[in-house]
Image (cartoon, rainbow, N blue to C red):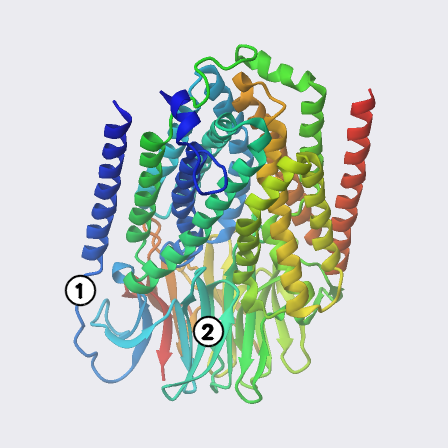
Amino acid sequence: MTTRTRTALGALLIVVVVLATGVYLWQAGGPSGTAAAAAPGGASITLVDQRDGGDAVSTTDPGQTDGPRTPTGLRCQRVYTAGGTTVCLRLAGIGPSFEAAVIVGGAEVKTIPLPGVPSRARVSASGKVVSWTVFVTGDSYASAGGFSTRTGYYDLRDGTLVESLETFALTVDGVAHTALDVNYWGMTFQTDDTTFYATVGTGGRRWLIKGSTSAKTAATVRQGPECPSLSPDGKHLAYKKATKWVGRWELAVEDLETGTEKVLPNTSGIDDQAAWLDDNTLAYGVPSQQTGVPGIYRVQSNGTTDPILIATAASSPVPNR
Amino acid sequence: MYIASARAGTRTRLGAVPKTVVALGVVSLLTDVSAEMITAFLPVYLLFSLNIGYVQFGLLDGLYTGATAVLRLVGGHFADRLRRPKLVAGVGYGLSAVTKLVFPAVGASALGIGGVIAADRAGKGLRTAPRDALISLSVPTDQLGTAFGVHRSMDTVGALIGPVVTFLILMNLGTAPTPIFVVSFGFALLGLIVLGFFVPERPKATASPGPAPSIRAGLALLKDVPFRRAGVVAALLGIATVSDAFVFVLVQRTTEVPLGVLPLLPLGTALTFLLFAAPLGRLADVVGRWPVFFGGHVLLLGVYLLLLAPAGGYGVAVAALIMHGLFYAATDGVLSAWTGAMIPPSLRGSGLAVVQTGQALARLVSSIGFGFLLQYAALGTAVLTAVCALAVALVAVLVVTRKETTS
């Protein structure tokens, strides 16, 4: 083969590959999905519709399985709404980087750049405090089983922004703890908008913690529970709990007055911060074992019924109250 | 054919670098667009599309990094043995390209995804030494620094474009994974085509001077004092090099710039590396590779020292990132130029692989050690440990080089 034919053939192949990729992208960018009919009135839930790889925030009827979904126009990786305040964790720019948009009454009142990929979002029942958890890639690259999270919150009452709970004074089993590998995830607020629960991980162990945003302190409660979620009346705490081995959780609910815990039957596989649809009903995401695409289930918090599938290919359940 | 054209038309406007190096730079650029597209997408893919936690993933990742570092030795050895570095590099590039299409097939299995990433790393391991051998064999020894500098600079351009492409696809087509993998495969395929059709095999001579390539001959290289010294030096300094991810986290925390800036910090290092890789490579050709390589690590010590300053803000953060980028510009390509010049052409692939593997394994040890340290140490202690480790390594390296030259 002469140099000239070689060059020509190479150039031809390059054109073919570029055209083929271009045609593929053009087709992939075509109209996809159909707008669903409006959901019936009454109680509804908001979710992130992950069908066709999408991230459209939609509403649906939690009373049936895979009822029609109505897009809200928002696009988020993770979303939560309470007390008229919505927090939307969404794609923001190259990197790719992400941001938390705080929306009140349809208007964006605050946008906070995030240091990683969205994982959890929560708004206090009053709508006054919003919180988020992101995964930061890389900084525990080669450490065994290592991963790294940042949890922050924004207080709408006085504009306080805490980008990471790492700045809080943490005590582990009563002893002040300063190790650098501290990770927080899954924050939830009590009805006083100051007391919070969350998870802390350090030195390969995880604890449920209870803290105060006014005192900027947190203390471990006990080992095990992750991604806590307080019921609207503040009397129950739902969380995921590894009952058999790490990475395989079940949903459990603790009565904060009596301290009794109940593991909800047949919730194995949950990987989510559960959302309370009302004081007696929980909704949560379970990733499919095969595809990883999560489905949303609802279950009675007293553990008397088996979970019921609400939506497939959807995540981030949010009650619409 | 090649020798004749090497005299005439190989000079291009990119400095005085031969076409082969520029073509290999284009191959690396395209391949890096492909690879960095995936690197940028992987967290979204694992967490949002597949719901796999880093708990399952982190452990596998560390294991595979160590295992595939050794594949560099295999790639280097076969490049020499078959006398076809381009073919071996092509196998590596091809393997990495194919993995982009396998991703969707393994679904949400953490083990499967780990396996695909391992195959991708294996491809990178296989191709690195043969590609560097090709570069080093296409330029006169006194221009090695410039050639590697230009190559690394083009490589970094690709690394910067990749995440932008990923973002554009995510923004316009949503988070569906298939378009990302298809476009990434497209870029990888373009890289393979450029390698196949625009990079000549065995650039300099039909029979390279030097001992016949064999595993024994490769190991015998370590008997050569300057080469062994260079390998030891690279490994010693590698052990004292804190991995990039930790550096960026430490920069954010010590300077107290907003946490949201964290994802942008790697851009500072990459841009500096991109701009200074070629000039510092040329400087290494003029003043010597060892002083530039050593000076680069002194700059790294400067980065660590800057991290000791409390709450420095944006000024200190930018200064630290520029110095971090200069550290890469003064060491990454320069190491290959420095050691490449000590290795007989017939063993170029094996020799470069030995040094690079030593450095990669040393950095892995450092990364695991530093991760372990962070479990117990506070911020100041961790930075101070990094400063002390690098200072000790720099002194040790000076002692080693002095002792070896006088013995």
Q: Is residue B12 above or below residue B269?
A: above
Q: Can residue A274 be seen in this view?
A: yes
The kind of secondary structure element at disc 2 is: strand
Query: Which residue is identified by label 1?
Result: A31
Foreground pick, A129 / B20: B20
Disc nearer the start of the sequence (1/2): 1
Q: For residue B187, what is the image quadrant?
A: top left
Q: Is residue B71 above or below residue B35?
A: above
- Which residue appears at 66% of the width and 35% of the height? B289
Foreground pick, B64 / A258: B64
Residue pushed farthest top?
B212
- Which residue appears at 23% of the width and 54% of the height? A25
Residue B323 badge:
none
Q: In this view, does B196 lie above or below B299?
A: above
Q: For residue A278, what is the image quadrant?
A: bottom left
Q: For residue B406, what is the image quadrant?
A: top right
Binning the other alpha carbons within 10 Å of mark 1 as few (below 14), some (14 to 19) or many (20 upward) gives few
Query: Which residue is identified by label 2?
Result: A100
The chain to which mark 1 is attached is A
Say whether mark 2 and mark 1 are on the same chain. yes
Q: Is residue A204 visible?
A: no
Q: Which amino acid does label 2 sit on?
A: Ala
Q: How many numbered marks, from 0 up? A: 2
Residue A315 is situated, as x and y percent measured from the top left of the image, at: 35, 65
Please state, as top left, top right, bottom left or bottom right, where the C terminus of chain B lies in the image. top right
The kind of secondary structure element at disc 1 is: loop
Is residue B296 left or right of B58 when viewed as pictured?
A: right
Please state, as top left, top right, bottom left or bottom right, where the N terminus of chain B lies in the image. top left
